[in-house]
Image (cartoon, rainbow, N blue to C red):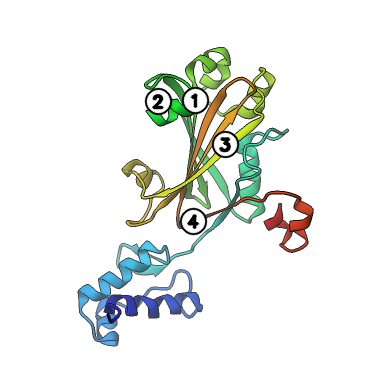
Amino acid sequence: MPEPKYRKVAAELRELITSGALRVGDRLPTEPNLQERFGVSRNTVRDATALLVNEGLVESVPGRGGGMVVRKKVTLTFHAHRAEMPGPTAETDAWRSEVEQQGYLASQDFKLTIEALAPDLADRLHVVPDSSAVLRQCVRYVNGEPSSVQNTYYPMDLANEVQELLSPRDIPQGTTRLLAERGYLQLSYYDEYVSRMPTPEEASLLRLQPGTPVLLHIRTGYSINRPVRVSINVFSGDRNRVVSTHGDPAIIAKFLPEEAAE
């Protein structure tokens, strides 16, 4: 079966972008120019550029000076093996430091709500479905563009005991360290990775282009006696990569750049 025409058009435009012939901020040729150049219909051109939009290579800019413009693609590396681990640095500060070490600007919006737990979350936390929980949400931005959403759920009985979890502000020492100070040292973690299409709320928060998937990193943290939280990091599929190392980091460091091995 021959390759669809729109894919051939997209492939040539993609090559112009990846080779550097078209740089960040450059406009693609107009639709009429592309129709004439490739001998295709307007719909074929639109299907081709829509494919590039979904890949995060171009974006539609409104106005007289707009059109389809090559997009600056920022890809953040998230080190899952060291994220939110107990330590002297608060989770937000550790995340901000990692973003800045990669040469980007970090910012976030924080919100606290009380939610009824869905059955899957209640099961992870070993509480009754529809039980109340504290949801601490951070929308995280890299260079001003939303990169991920972190939703962390704490059982209500635990929040009633550790009242700072109910604070509508960021916790200075971080929740992991706070819980450890109150007798809930997290000794074990269970991580899950799920790829799917975004919910409408996720698409809005992350300003996702149509067709862009998300990657979920779901971490359940356990003290010696109970699960104490579930954190769900929702990553924009076109702006992040997740790495995790296991074993002796000194061995890995011999073969990978230092920032990749850490």
Of callouts 1 and 2, the N-terminal one = 2
**Which residue is labeled 1 in the image?**
125
| Tag 1 secondary structure | helix
- Please tell me the numbered disc located at residue 190: 3
Gap between marks 4 and 3, in whole Å?
24 Å
| Kind of residue at badge 2 | Leu
Give coordinates of residue 101: x percent, y percent: 67, 52
Gap between marks 4 and 1, in whole Å?
30 Å
Give coordinates of residue 102: x percent, y percent: 64, 55
- Please tell me the numbered disc located at residue 117: 2
Query: Looking at the image, is mark 4 or mark 1 nearer the viewer?
Result: 1
| Kind of residue at badge 4 | Arg
Q: Are marks 1 and 2 in contact (CB under 8 Å)?
A: yes
Relative horizontal placement of residue 198, taking residue 140 as reference (left or right): left
Q: Nearer the viewer, residue 85 or 203?
A: 85
Query: Looking at the image, is mark 1 or mark 2 nearer the viewer?
Result: 1
**Which residue is labeled 4 in the image?**
239
Neighbourhood count class around disc 4 (C-alpha, 10 Å): few under 14, some 14–19, many 20 upward: some
